[in-house]
Image (spheres, grey):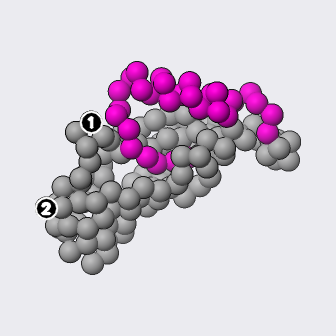
Amino acid sequence: MVVTQELRLSTSGHTEIMKITEQVRELLRGSCLRQGVVCLFVPGSTASITTMEFEPGLIEDLRRAWEKIAPVHGEYAHNARWHDGNGYAHVRASLVGPSLVVPFVDGELLLGTWQDVVFIDFDNRSRDRRIIVQIVGE
């Protein structure tokens, strides 16, 4: 069986990292499926989804790492072409990726002890975002 849902988020952008583990668990519970996979997909090219230990130190470490890899004030051909100033957001989102698959058994996500599902909005402005959640299982 396949169950498709959506999560909606209002974000402030600027590498905002949001923990969404509980929202995903709630959708999984509502599906009544016992085992399978949850696939999460972010439509758009300036946001990503991944897992991490959601704690302030690591959040700051990741922001610093992304600033080294794709600095906000760097030179981007995307900005030269479109003049929207978010070339860095496209690069960062491409590196992290738009999707994540998490298995589940007995209706529970098989995440590690400190592992959470997070949504990251890299864009340079606030946005209304959506995440497509497709639950495949039995």
The answer to which image quadrant residue 27 occupies is bottom left
The answer to whether residue 61 is magenta is yes
Q: Which residue is mark 2?
A: 106
Is residue 110 visible from the viewing direction of this image? yes
Of all residues, the one furthest to the bottom in this rendering is 1
Q: Amino acid at mark 2?
A: Asp
Q: Position of residue 81 (x, y in %)?
A: 85, 47
Q: Which residues are magenta?
A: 47-76
Quarter containing the N terminus? bottom left
Dot 1: what SS? Answer: loop
Residue 80 percent location from the top left of the image: 86, 42
- Please state if 85 lies on the left or on the right of 122 as rendered: right
At 39% from the left edge and 23% from the top edge, which residue is drawn?
56
Q: Is residue 86 magenta?
A: no
Q: Relative to 116, does residue 14 appear above or below in the rendering?
A: above
Q: Residue at x 54, y 58 (%)?
A: 43
Q: Position of residue 8 (x, y in %)?
A: 43, 51
Q: Circle 1: is it few (<14), some (14-19), or many (20+) Cα within 10 Å?
A: few
The x and y percentages for residue 28 are: 24, 60
Residue drawn at x 40%, y 21% is 57
Q: CA distance from mark 2 to mark 1?
A: 20 Å
Please tell me which residue is depicted at 54% across the width and 51% down the height of the picture: 97
> Which residue is outermost to the left?
106
Of callouts 2 and 1, which one flags the residue occurring earlier in the amino acid sequence? 2
Q: Which residue is labeled 1 in the image?
A: 114
